[in-house]
């Protein structure tokens, strides 16, 4: 749970680096995804959280590229997701 909250917080920090007009969309998108996946079954699939964190990181990189934001901003997210 702590790792998921760290990932979510870091994604919201990255959203602040986006242009102002796109921030509400991506912050809502991030929240909806975290809410949708908050009750995943880690018993039947113990790797599901790692897969979701990896997907969150890859999507964050895609969005940063889309808005020409330096991808090094996501280094902390990468570190959190890979632990």
Image (cartoon, helix red, strand yellow):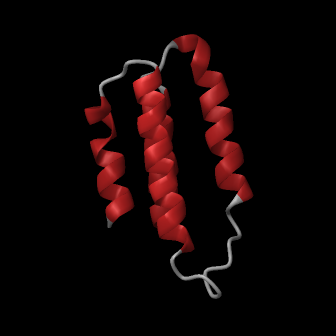
57 versus 73 height, above or below: below
Image side of residue 48 versus residue 33, left or right: left
Q: Quadrant of the N terminus?
A: bottom right
Q: Is residue 4 above or below residue 71?
A: below
Q: Residue at x 67, y 49 (%)?
A: 33
Q: Could you say where residue 19 lies in the image, as x and y percent from the top left?
A: 50, 14
Q: Is residue 18 visible?
A: yes
Whether 76 is drawn above or below 12: the answer is below
* Residue 1 in view: no
- Place of residue 22 in the rendered image (x, y in percent of width and height, measured from the top left): 59, 18
Task: Look at 61% across and 33% down and name the residue there.
Answer: 27
The quadrant where residue 52 appears: bottom right
| Residue 2, horizontal then vertical, whole percent | 48, 65
Number of callouts in the render? 0
Residue sitting at x 53%, y 69% = 49
User: Which residue is depicted at the point 56% across and 72% down?
Assistant: 48
Q: Quadrant of the C terminus?
A: bottom left
Q: Nearer the viewer, residue 76 or 44?
A: 44
Question: Whole-percent x and y of residue 51?
Answer: 51, 65
């Amino acid at each position: 749970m702590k790792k998921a909250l760290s990932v979510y917080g870091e994604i919201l920090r990255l959203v602040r680096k986006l242009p102002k007009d796109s921030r509400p969309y991506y912050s809502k998108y991030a929240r909806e995804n975290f809410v949708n996946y908050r009750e995943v079954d880690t018993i039947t699939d113990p790797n599901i959280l790692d897969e979701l964190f990896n997907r969150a990181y890859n999507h964050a990189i895609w969005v940063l590229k889309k808005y020409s934001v330096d991808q090094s901003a996501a280094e902390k997210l990468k570190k959190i997701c890979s632990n």
